[in-house]
Image (cartoon, rainbow, N blue to C red):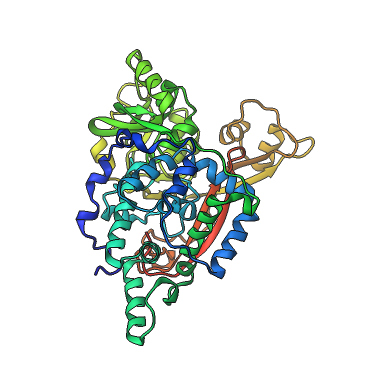
Amino acid sequence: MSDDNGSYDESYGGPESENYNSSYQFEDSLTLQDSLWDRVRDGFNMPDIDSTYTNKHEQWYASRPDYVSRMLERSKKYLYHIVVEVEKRGMPTEIALLPMIESGFNPKALSTSKASGIWQFIPSTGKDFGLKQNYWKDSRKDVTAATQAALNYLQKLYTMFGAWDLALAAYNAGEGTVARAIERNRQLGLPTDYQHLSLPDETRNYVPKLQAIKNIIFRPENYGLTLNEIPNKPYFTTVQAPNKIDAKLAAELAGISLEEFNALNPSFTRPVLITENSHQKLLLPTWAASNFTNNLSGYNRPLSNWHSYQPKRGERLGAIASQFGISIYELSATNNLKPNRNLIVRRPLLVPASVQSGLTRPIDVAAMAQLPIEIPVERESSSKSVSISHKVKQGDTLAKLAKRYGITSKQIMQQNHLKSKNLAVGQVLQFEKQEEKTSNTTSQSRGSKTSGKPSHKKTTASTKTRTSTSSAAHKKTTTTHSKKTKSTH
């Protein structure tokens, strides 16, 4: 029996998860229902758990109809695919609802223990199950690959423990935690089923929470809720794309918004989608696939506007941004850096292609794939960056604010992406200015023990944070679950 050390049997998952290609042709006989919810209900096969924990979570969801609606709306893109994959394996369809309690079906959900994607894999477990994570891509967020990996893991756990509630507990807490709890009860002569085990608080709530979701899906009217209707047909399909193309252009060729494109392809971490292979696969809404293929075949301009730039010794981030006509915020976000004008970067950066010959070079995909996802930087010792937030009041102008804060009007406009000099009362401006450091300022080395950098190994206690994004304002609603287990996924 495997312990919480990330040592998994390769027969349950490996690199093939990364190359998974979905197909729905096999299941013609299973699409008789018009509603996907009917199909999900028909596949419920796990024994019900009636407990005070279940009641508590039912009440929590019932009292938050807006949250439930947003979660179900997000699930529209992914649930059909997951249900199909669950059915292929003969698993109960309750398993397809698991992302609701893991991430609220937010593919970009990230916990404080760095668990990511709708299935919330931590980095180490993701790698164990073939989910690549490098500078270009985080396959834990890849909906199809992560679904394969999660179902592989769950099948393995079911084989180990012989019951789905125990498999789910192990998915949450680690197989070693559950195995030890079973052994303790066995030695004490106590029952060894899920509800009798002494488990961490989050794990004791985990299966009842899924039961609460199951009950709501089965009879939403009992909780004063309405299910967003989901057709019983594929939402997305796979298309073949060139080995280098900007995400923004790919969305335009498909005739969809960049937001929609990113929701289906959240594993790409840069604005340019790039691979060492001759081509790559993208997910698009079924109706948009032909748009993309047809428009791509007639497109005769460059497919990417991004090149690689090697900063000169001592060159600051702000100077690089100005050189390429890009805001420091966009340059920072593109390269996972803090928007500090005085940061000195010694690694290649992604920058817009320059008209100046020799200034940039083609992207070395393999070399940049080896870069740390978070690029190490150095702070210029002679000055520091000060962040300023200003709420616009009556009578404020760019010129007055520039004079007040010792920054130019142009810098305020660039840092806030303003298209005109007009300001609105109540508008919040965020910008930075540089100040000389005082002589008694001490700097910490990047490897200092005082940095307090947390460990994210499986033996580390953590707190999982679920995030959900509203479709209108994109604000984040957070639900926090205490994670005291020795292994997270």
Q: Judge left or right: residue 38 versus residue 14.
A: right
Question: Which percent across, then down, holds residue 104?
Answer: 50, 50
Q: Looking at the image, which residue is at 57% across and 51% down?
A: 219
User: Which residue is painted at 47% across and 52% down in the image?
Assistant: 103
Figure check: 168 above or below 426? below
Residue 122 percent across, percent down from the top left = 37, 56
Instruction: Give the vertical position of 449 relative to 105 (above or below).
Output: below
Q: Tell me which corner region of the image, top left, top right, bottom left or bottom right, holds residue 402.
A: top right
Q: Is residue 360 left or right of residue 420?
A: left
Residue 113, percent from left and from top: 42, 60
In the rendered image, residue 307, in percent from the top left (x then y), is placed at: 34, 29
Where is 469 relative to 439, above or below? above
Whether residue 212 is visible here, answered yes or no, is: yes
Query: In which image quadrant can residue 364 be found?
Result: top left
Q: Is residue 316 visible?
A: no
For the N terminus, the quadrant is bottom left
Q: Nearer the viewer, residue 223 or 449?
A: 223
On the picture, is 249 further left or further right than 132? right
